[in-house]
Amino acid sequence: MYNEATVVGSVIEDLRKTFPYVVCVDDGSRDGSQSAARAAGAVVVQHPINLGQGAALQTGIEYALQDPEMTSIVTFDADGQHRVIDAKAMVARIESGEAEIVLGSRFLDDRTKISVQKRIVLKTAAVQSRMATGMNLTDAHNGLRAINREVASKLHLTQNRMAHASELVNQLATIKPRWVEHPVEIIYTDYSKSKGQSLLNSVNILAELFFR
């Protein structure tokens, strides 16, 4: 989370009805997000400064791996864009033995309402990812994922910001786990839109594709 004090408490409370063990990586928030997350029942691991999504994911994965009883990890956004019901179904596919990692895709059904511009950017990113890795993904920049312990232990993200999404897929192409995509709904709320996240992420994805 990064400055999500107004929403992160309700996100965690909703999550903990299904997933009791929530680790919230605070990426240098200055608005009291840490207190809100702890009050909602999450363990909070803090970065002293803002490092970006990739760094936060790696920190969260490394923290979760310290629990010897942990069997799978779900990466879940703090701003309310992901749905717990989707995460639950993704973990079930891991527990059934069908897959070792389940990747969310907003393009496997028509539930996600998305602008034409952002759709073009994400489709372009997916094509580029397929060409680079051979993994036939429909949505290479979806933050909702379920990962079993073995695969999580092999991930070592070094790209702190948006480039981490492509780095993760590149590492999966090397690890070669059993993987599937799962249809998920991304909810673009008035809150997330007011923060400019949708437009900013699109710009960052384009920068990653053309200038890395």
Image: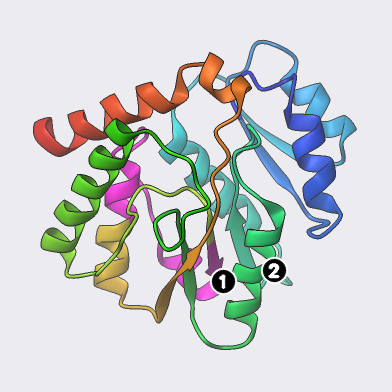
The picture places residue 56, in percent across and down from the top left corner, at 51, 38
| Rendered position, 195 above or below 189 | above
Element under disc 2: loop
Q: Residue furthest top?
A: 30
Q: Nearer the viewer, residue 79 or 108?
A: 108
Which residues, given as a range, are shown in magenta?
Answer: 146-168
User: Is residue 147 located in the magenta-colored stretch of the structure?
Assistant: yes
Q: In the rendered view, does 1 fall on the left or right side of 144?
A: right
Element under disc 1: helix
Residue type, numbered disc 2: Met
The picture places residue 119, in percent across and down from the top left corner, at 31, 41
Residue type, numbered disc 1: Arg
Disc sitting over residue 70 in the figure: 2
Disc sitting over residue 149 in the figure: 1
Q: In the rendered view, does 41 fall on the left or right side of 178?
A: right
Which residue is pictured at 74% across the width and 72% down the height?
69
Specify whether residue 115 is in view.
yes
